Image (cartoon, rainbow, N blue to C red):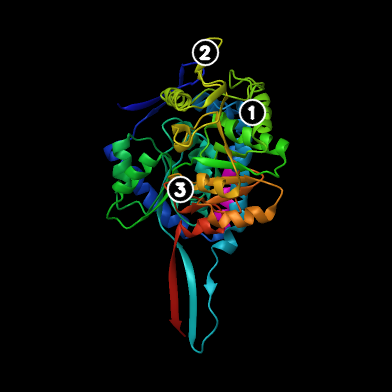
Amino acid sequence: MSELVVDDPYTGGEAARVPYLRGDDVDAALERARTSAREIAALPVAERVALCLRAVEAMEREVEPIAQEISRQMGKPVTQARGEMGGMAGRARHMCSIAPASLADIVLPEQPGLERRIVRTPKGVVYCLPAWNYPLLTAVNVVIPAVLSGNSVVLEHSHRSPLVGDRFAAAFAEAGGPSCVVQSIQCDHATSEKIVGDVRVDHVAYTGSVFGGQRMSQAAAGRFIDLGLELGGNDPAYVAADADLAKAIDGIVDGACYNAGQSCCAVERVYVHESLYDAFIEGSLALLQQYVMGDPRDEKTNLGPIAQPQHVGVLLAQVEDAVRRGARLLLGGTPCSVEGRGRFFPPTLLVDVPEDAEVMSFESFGPLLPITKVTGDEDALRRMNDDALGLTASVWTNDRERVARLAPQLEFGTVYMNRCDALDPGLPWTGVKASGKGSTLSALGFEHLTRPKSWNFRV
């Protein structure tokens, strides 16, 4: 195939058409990136900050067109797409605000006749492959810190949301600064893997599936470069006996269904203390019934279609497996359309779900809420950790000491108390186990996009 064609998950029509780069065009892009990397590295941090802020402002001038494009490409309700624009700008500005201090030299105590310091130097060319589910957020997590650190970026956005990559590249072009400091490309998978193995690439940042992360790692084998891998999660929530029930229901249902559940840190499995179990189910059922499926461009819609055509079948198979193993299906569970349009999966409530059900063991990436009963903290802890993925976990309780006791034992990159499906740019976004490696955002995010250099001067 010579081009990428993206369908609209609601209308079924064409949402985008983008040519694939091959051969000489890829070489030219990488050569431009090398040249731009040298130019951006030569700029003071303050000038890089100003450049990034101008790029963010350029994107903010296009909020509505970008939000509409996102809705067409992956089905996100336009109200949520506008919200993602705000989140993108907030993260970018936070990273700009901490860049001067985070990238400053570390000067060691004086010794007679010696100057000693640790300098953070740019890596060079960063190859960034963001995901489609939050196309602005998964891109900004890397693009802005990479440029702030003095790197150029070759941005290959997901095949579901290629136009977002073009928006970032256009914003940096409008903002001035070195030419092609952020380039947007599209390639087939084989070409992408060749780029990962190319000596002109100095760092790879990939957000996507575990399988995709494995392919990226294999493509980089023997190169000794770092890969930042954010590979999703099967994130649990534990509702303790003393939880504020109403707040837990509101937070967990939203965490399971926002963006049609297509979030790496969505709530994927829920463990409720036996004393609150029936009340939690009753409240969740009432809330799930209030979701409105429909045209994602309609302001009333808060549950859009499923982005990927093949994924509806995956969700159905998980529901059928759970029921076959003894779970009770109280709501949803069957793919549908709205007035004959769209590939939807409705909010789905599964209760009494056994541990061996696939929906408890594998990431759903859809609006499924599987619930099971636990006897207390230790029972919940064992079940929460019993998974190959480890991105986030949430504990719902009025006892901070309970969470402080459980947090060191929970095998996840982020532990929440009384919240979920959220990201603070002041904290590193990171996973353990098969959820990936490395981190983005926070001051630590700059460490993965630079390398330390020691200055050991006798003066």
Q: How many marks?
A: 3
Q: Are marks 2 and 3 in contact (CB under 8 Å)?
A: no
Residue 416 vs residue 107, the one in the foreground: 416
Q: Residue at x 59, y 24 (%)?
A: 303
Separation of marks 3 and 1 at Cα, in angstroms: 31 Å
| Label 3 or label 1, whichever comes before in sequence order | 1
Camera-side mark, 2 or 3: 2
Dot 2: few (<14), some (14–19), or many (≥20) neighbours within 10 Å? some
Main SS category, magenta section: helix
Q: Is residue 442 magenta?
A: no
Q: Name the residue carrying label 3.
A: 181
Q: Secondary structure at mark 2?
A: strand
Q: Position of residue 309 (x, y in %)?
A: 43, 23
The dot on residue 383 is: none
Camera-side mark, 2 or 1: 2
Q: Position of residue 459 (x, y in %)?
A: 47, 85
Q: Residue at x 45, y 37 (%)?
A: 361
Q: Is residue 53 magenta?
A: yes
Where does the magenta region start and end?
46-56
Residue 333 vs residue 155, the one in the foreground: 333
**The N terminus is located in which quarter?**
top left
Say which amino acid is labelled 1: Thr
Residue 133 vs residue 86, the one in the foreground: 133
Say which amino acid is labelled 2: Arg
Q: Residue at x 44, y 79 (%)?
A: 456
Q: Name the residue carrying label 2.
A: 341
Q: Residue at x 55, y 66 (%)?
A: 104
